[in-house]
Image (spheres, rainbow, N blue to C red):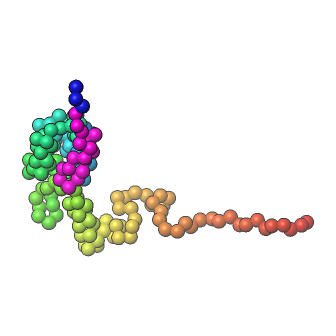
Amino acid sequence: MAEEEIKYFVRIGTTDLDGTKSVRVALTGIKGVGRHTSSVIARMAQVNEYSQLGRLPEADVNRIRNAVESYGSRIPAWMSNRPKDVYTGESKHLFGADVTMAKDDDVNMMRKIRCYKGIRHETGQKVRGQRTKSSGRTGSTVGVSKKKIAQGGGE
């Protein structure tokens, strides 16, 4: 039996995925795709989610690419990672650099309208109600320092 060729890197979207992993795990390498989303994409592409991504024929990989591109329009709004966009009002599912850009835009908007979360982001403090008395400290260390013991000295 001839050993099958394996592609170690498979390009989907703007991301190089690990071809040695299963389809389900490899798709989570795309920013904006988690475990559940990767399973749904594999089912949409009609590919076995447990097969190795690098061993799939090119036709299957193309079906996965098409499923990733059309994912946002084929799922219900509650499954998307941006169910109601602040600017347009429509539900979208973002991938790759778009996720980072949308997050940065949201934080900048919160800073601009001076809401509590925006002010916490600005000052670099915890945003989601965590305690800050003992954890999450930044900056220079403030505390008790030991006195140096005097050298020598007789009785």
Would you place residue 24 above or below residue 109 in this image?
A: above
- Indicate the position of residue 70 as horizontal and vertical percent values: 9, 50
Q: Give the position of the N terminus as an image quadrant.
A: top left
Q: Give the position of the C terminus as an image quadrant.
A: bottom right
- Indicate the position of residue 91 as horizontal and vertical percent values: 12, 56
- Does the stretch in magenta take in 70? no
Does residue 152 show up? yes
- Does the stretch in magenta take in 8? yes
Q: Which residues are magenta?
A: 4-20
- Indicate the position of residue 57 as horizontal and vertical percent values: 15, 38
Tell me which corner region of the image, top left, top right, bottom left or bottom right, holds residue 54. top left
Residue 58 located left or right of residue 111:
left
Instruction: Give the residue at x 17% y 34%.
Output: 48
Which residue occupies the extreme top position in the image? 1
- Indicate the position of residue 119 as horizontal and vertical percent values: 33, 70
Instruction: Give the residue at x 47% y 62%.
Output: 137
Residue 27 located left or right of residue 65:
right
